[in-house]
Image: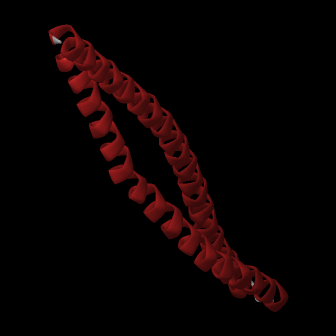
Amino acid sequence: MMENKMDDLWDKTDDLEKMVEQNLRNLNRDLGKVKAEKASLLAEEQRLKRELYECQEGIEKMDRYSSKALDEGNEEDVRRFQEKKSVMTANLSDLQAAYQFASSKSQEMNPILDNLVADIRELESIKRNKF
């Protein structure tokens, strides 16, 4: 009788250990996916930030060119530079919106990463202390 109870206890322990191991594998797999997604979002955010900066620089450059052309009395160049600036300004708005979106998505990943890491640590602690 006592032997049966001990066998049942060992079976439950084995089942619990297997469950912890499986959960750890799943969480580590999920952590890898989330880290990869976060890295992708950060790369996109940096790319958009660079494009945003370049667009702002281009707008400032067109302002300088336009001002210089105006000083020289070259109305055709002034118009051409202002048209380019107008296109860049429209693009700037799109880039700002895309950058803000990418930045917010990247920030949304932080709590998810933190939770996964905390869950993994908790299960590893259980595994160390119980088995």
> Among all residues in the image, which is located at the extreme right?
76
Q: Nearer the viewer, residue 92 or 119?
A: 119
Query: Could you tell me which residue is drawn at 45 percent across and 28 percent down?
Result: 25
- Left or right side of 103 for 79: right
Query: Could you tell me which residue is drawn at 63 percent across and 60 percent down?
Result: 51
**How does the figure colour the protein chain or chains?**
secondary structure
| 5 in relation to 58, above or below | above
User: In x, y percent, where is residue 81?
Assistant: 75, 81
Q: Nearer the viewer, residue 72 or 11?
A: 11
User: In x, y percent, where is residue 28?
Assistant: 44, 32
Q: Quadrant of the N terminus?
A: top left
- Is residue 131 in sight in this rendering? no
Q: Quadrant of the C terminus?
A: top left
| 47 in relation to 89, above or below | above
User: In x, y percent, where is residue 99?
Assistant: 54, 65
Query: Could you tell me which residue is drawn at 20 percent across and 12 percent down?
Result: 6
User: In x, y percent, where is residue 33?
Assistant: 53, 40
Q: How many marks?
A: 0
> Among all residues in the image, which is located at the extreme top?
3
- Left or right side of 97 for 61: right
Q: Nearer the viewer, residue 18 or 75?
A: 18
- Is residue 7 in sight in this rendering? yes
Q: Nearer the viewer, residue 88 or 74?
A: 88
